[in-house]
Amino acid sequence: MTLSRLDIQDFRNLATARLDFSPRCNLITGENAAGKTSLLEAIHVLARLRSFRTQRLETLIREGCEAFQLVARLEESGRTLPVGLRRGRKELDIRLDGAPVRRVSDLAAHFPLVVITADLHRVLEEGPKYRRQFLDWGLFHVEPEFHATWRQYAQALKQRNACLRQGVAEAQVRIWDAPLLASGGRIHEMRCTYIKELEPLFAEQAERILGLAPLSLRYAPGWAQRLDYPAALAEALVRDREQGQTRVGPHRADLQFLQADQDVRDRLSRGQQKQLLIALLLAQAELLFRRRDRICQFLVDDLPAELDAEHQARVLAQLRELGSQVFITAIDAAALDLGDWPEPARFHVEHGVVREVV
């Protein structure tokens, strides 16, 4: 699936724009604060119904306006899929192929979107939550049953935690153990299988981009390795009742990045860590293509500011080899070598006005 057209109205400083995109490479240039990142953000909001810069969609409405609107066309195998989103101060209306969208997953399933921004290092620095998000994004797109299983797990976890907070009898808490273990155990199995497939692709991508080896992934499932999941849940019950929450399970899992069996945070610079995470994203895109024959859309914000020319070239070469659709921003078009890309589309943003560069 590729994004072939995007119409923008009253989104941040972008008053109105119609953009016809290349299915491969799209370069967006302009000075700082011109609106380059806002254009990427609009694509992100359309695909995931959230921004990578703010929690509140209403703040994206252009000053003095009542709503922003995004209308797009997705293309796949000769089929066109229209998508529309309108966000007012209080209301949100989303339509996919003319029908209302009730769940984010219904839209996200059509649009495997990957984001590379300056704060990518947060995945390593700010806790397991961000690493689980990476892992589960990949599973959502390659395992059809993952999303439904995760919803079952989240519902059982919510009910068990409510019982723990209310201090009900142990037998009532344990009512939720069976559905929690069934769905949580399946999530654990899917994650382990996914990591086993992802790890060699990640190691290859990291070696191509950073020239580093050996690199590996280690999955911590969310409970002590000396126990299986049912035993860990049973052993934790006393402490769970004291703290009012379930402290073991897939919702507490983590993903560790290792070089020569040591945490990469202790061995690599911040710049190298960002390159490492780019390698992970590329590996996920490669696995999605192998498993589901689907390409990813990559939003790459100001790559020249993040990587030197040599590593830029390595990343761009891998994106090109994967057949990805890429949207990449830069202050200066000359800072990026796109000579090997087939007919890249070029856009320039100035004071919120977007024009195609012919």
Image (cartoon, helix red, strand yellow):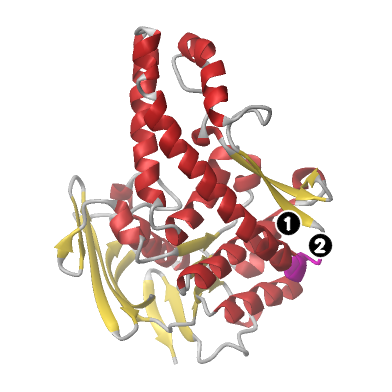
Q: Earlier in the sequence, mark 1 or mark 2?
A: 2
Three-letter residue code for mark 1 = Gly
Q: What span is colored magenta in the figure? A: 207-213
How much space separates mark 1 and mark 2, taking CA atoms? 13 Å
Q: Residue at x 20, y 70 (%)?
A: 97
Q: Which of 248 and 96 is in front in this view?
A: 248
| Residue 89 forms part of the magenta stretch | no
Is 172 drawn above or below residue 127 in the view shown?
above
Residue 276 placement: quadrant: bottom right
Disc 1 crowd rating (10 Å Cα; few below 14, some 14-19, many 20+) is few
Three-letter residue code for mark 2 = Leu
Q: Give residue 256's position: percent from left, percent from top.
A: 68, 44
Point out which mark residue 116 bears. none
Q: Mark 1 points at which residue?
A: 271
Q: Name the residue under label 2.
A: 212
Q: Give residue 123's position: percent from left, percent from top.
A: 60, 47
Q: Is residue 265 left or right of residue 241?
A: right
